[in-house]
Amino acid sequence: MADKRIYIYDSSLRSGALPDGGAFSGADKLAIAEALDGLGIDYIEGGEPGRGTADDALFAAAPEFAQARLTALSGLQAPGGSAAGDPALARARASGARIVCLAGAVSQQHARAALGTEPREHIDMIAEGISHVAGWADEAMFICDHFFDGFKVDAHYALECAATAYIHGARWVVLCDSNGGTLPHEITDIVEEVAKALPSSHIGIRCLDDGDNAVAGTLAAVRAGAHQVQGTFNGLGERCGNANLASVIPALVLKLGCETAVTTENLSRLTAVSRQIDARLNRPSPPRAPYVGADAFNHGKEPNAAARLEHIDPGAVGNQRRSAARDEADPDSLSRRLAGLGIEADLEDPMGQRLLESLRENEQKGLNYDGAEASFELFARGHLGTLPNFFRLDSFRVIDERSIDARGRLVTLSEASVRVQVGDNRHMMVAEGVGPVHALDVALRKALGDAYPSLGELRLIDYKVRILNSEGGTKARIRVMIDSTDGTDNWSTVGVSDNVIDASYSALHDGIVYKLLRDELKREAGDGGH
């Protein structure tokens, strides 16, 4: 391949919302989109405008990316209708996304069965739909659904659909293995045929993983000439999922020598991004996942086996070598993470050693900071002596009462009381709320409100609870993740305990302290550090 630049298109935010993939909130989508942009993804698909509040919230937020371009997905206009008057295409235009990806079948069978249209009419729909979008969007793309199956039955028709999209303005014509059953050698052969009819610089590939070949098929397509790859992180998606970008990206960069916007430096964030997405779905990351899994470079009792058994340097993808003798956090990965936050630390001095040891202890207890960078920053600054002491909690109490009122209705009352110390002043506050966590949040912020009025800007936008050891039953350890915002910045915090209220308090506490820390750092920057 003369031109080695490969463009990466991520659809995790849509595929992750499918029944088999979990569900992302609006806050999740924004946080993940920012992480994907930081990694160097070229296109981030936000979903279909108008199909759900989470999708619409992401488009409404209009995030400003450094590298990525937010993309809207839409089907073609309805048979017999016009592209200009189609409601779905109108919503895509109104979303503000400047990249629009249309999807349509490219086999005669699917045109008739799925769309209820004749094959020739379907080609006309592709021409009209792409022309319409290309007229106002920065880029139009076309996903050729069921391309490989359609090609095997009628290569001429499949190629005519693809060529029609290209001729009428599609920047990318994406060949989709929609049922995931095409083998890699077949993908190679077919992509090479398509590259004879269309410029390879406009060909993309999307493979589903029903046959466990999505990553191999994607790489085969690239070697055959495709210049855009589509997939999801951690293989999210319906049925068996999509090509896993956590495997595709390092293979492209480290194995095939392709040029991507994912730089060598950014690639070291790969493991963190993969685990952040799992954390957002409130599920544990598979330890045996290639490249990014906790056991991907685990050599057990043979730490000297690394030279023979590691196909890449674990640090290249932000992972780490593990052995029975040295488990969990290691200095190299910790140093990279601190540097990413702008925190200078010497891990050889006593403070640095205590930080590393505490991190290892926390991870062994189930308290990791995947997807909760705010809590990690507070944890690190606390151990390094650079975290101001904004307040101290003396105690809190939460009461939850469930009873039948005078009208015979079942009612629940939640009340929280907190005692905190700010400087030399002690404050006590009692508050009611919709549930114990809300009551605790309200009481804590009221107690601190006089000393820190900026906390009035703070609000909780998402709350997740996950059991860490299901064998513990109702005594299991609990992981709570909270997303907070002050209207300008969003951040995520985490707490772990065998008590859900205690875990929630830890996450709430970190959310408040992080807000106060950000305010303090901004003041210092505004004062020139004086």
Image (cartoon, grey):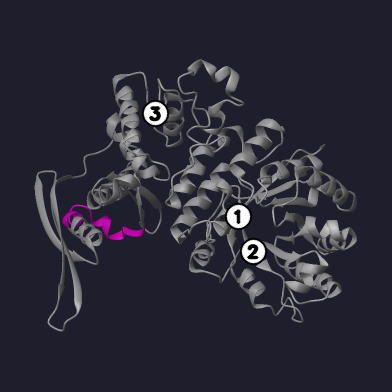
The residue that disc 3 covers is 344
The CA span between labels 3 and 1 is 35 Å
Q: Which residues are magenta?
A: 447-462
Rendered location of residue 330, percent (x, y): 42, 26
Instruction: Say if residue 93 shows up in the picture.
Output: yes
Drawn side of residue 247 relative to residue 454, left or right: right
Q: Residue furthest top?
A: 304
Q: Amino acid at mark 1?
A: Ser
The residue that disc 1 covers is 11
The residue that disc 2 covers is 73
Instruction: State which quarter of the image contains the C terminus.
Output: top left
Q: Is residue 425 magenta?
A: no
Rendered location of residue 60, percent (x, y): 51, 65
Drawn side of residue 446 relative to residue 2, left or right: left
Q: Secondary structure at mark 1?
A: loop
The CA span between labels 3 and 2 is 42 Å
Instruction: Say if residue 528 shows up in the picture.
Output: no
Q: Amino acid at mark 2?
A: Leu
Q: Which label sits in the foreground, 3 or 1?
A: 1
Rendered location of residue 267, percent (x, y): 57, 36
Mark 1: few/some/many CA within 10 Å (<14, 14-19, 20+): many
Mark with earlier residue (3, 2)? 2
Q: Residue furthest bottom?
A: 407
Q: Is residue 422 above or below residue 100?
A: above
Rendered location of residue 30, percent (x, y): 48, 56
Q: What's the residue at 78%, 60% (across, down)?
A: 170
Of residues 209 and 459, the one drawn nearer to the viewer in this rendering: 209
Q: What's the residue at 63%, 69% (across, down)?
A: 92
Mark with earlier residue (3, 1)? 1
Q: Marks 2 and 1: in contact by CB < 8 Å?
A: yes
